[in-house]
Image (spheres, rainbow, N blue to C red):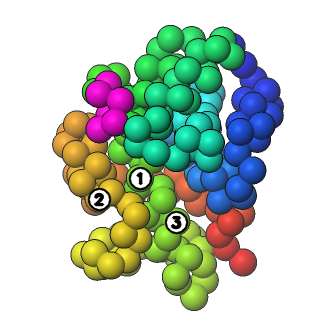
Amino acid sequence: MFTREESIEFLREHNKEDMHIKHAFAVEAAMRWFAKENGEDENYWGLIGLMHDIDWEEFPSTETHPMKGGEMLREKGYPDDFVHAVLAHGWEYSGIKPETLCEKYLYTIDELTGFITAVALVRPSKSLQDLELKSVKKKWKDKAFARGVNREVIEKGSELLNIPLETLIEQTITALRPVEKEIGLGS
């Protein structure tokens, strides 16, 4: 299996935009946290989160993403279940439904980490340390806010996981707090 350093190097070969790298780090941190909470392999889940959008900059169309990413990872030598998880995070486009716990979390928190980050960025502190569920829920209702985030995917993921949306939001905030500097938040 590839190390985190090798994976970051591969990711950076295909992603130059700082915001995409920060998103990868956010999803990685959340996946690690959820793996630990569920007694799963934190490093493996984290790497899947890190690499899930490897193809996005080069193939930003739903016609090609995440399928090109799956091909890239397969060619590089990542395991089949790893590739399957990456494909399942784009269920609507790949046709691969998230089945494993890891896949269900990745599917859900990919969009959720983006939403939570967006909420933090409009706060005076630009921090997750003082971000509360009520602030996220208030922005959730404002359909003009972070309109690029697919709330339906998050809600469908919440159902797949059988975890209330509020709980997932709170847990994801907790998961992201330790890495807020790496993902461009905080002072």
Taking the spot 24% from the left edge, 54% from the top edge, the residue there is 152
Q: Give the answer, above or below, for where 66 lies relative to 84.
A: below
Query: Upstream in the sequence, badge 3 or badge 1?
Result: 1
> Residue 91 versus residue 154: which sits nearer the camera?
91
Q: Amino acid at mark 2?
A: Arg
> Pointers 2 and 3 in contact (CB under 8 A)?
no
> Residue 31 versus residue 17: which sits nearer the camera?
17
Q: Give the answer, above or below, for where 145 lies relative to 148.
A: below
Q: Which residues are magenta?
A: 91-96
Mark 3 neighbour density, 10 Å: few (under 14) some (14–19) many (20 or more): many
For mark 3, what is the residue?
Answer: 117
Q: Position of residue 109 (x, y in %)?
A: 42, 47
Taking the spot 28% from the left edge, 75% from the top edge, the residue there is 143
Q: Amino acid at mark 3?
A: Thr
> Residue 165 versus residue 22: which sits nearer the camera?
22
Q: Position of residue 101 (x, y in %)?
A: 35, 27
CA–CA distance between discs 2 and 3? 14 Å
- Quadrant into which the C terminus falls: bottom right
Give the secondary structure at mark 3: helix
For mark 2, what is the residue?
Answer: 151
CA–CA distance between discs 2 and 1? 8 Å
Q: Is residue 93 inside the magenta stretch?
A: yes
Give the secondary structure at mark 2: helix
Query: Upstream in the sequence, badge 2 or badge 3?
Result: 3
> Pointers 2 and 1 in contact (CB under 8 A)?
yes
Label disc, if present, on residue 111 of the rendered structure? 1
Determine whether, in the image, residue 129 is placed left or right of residue 181: left
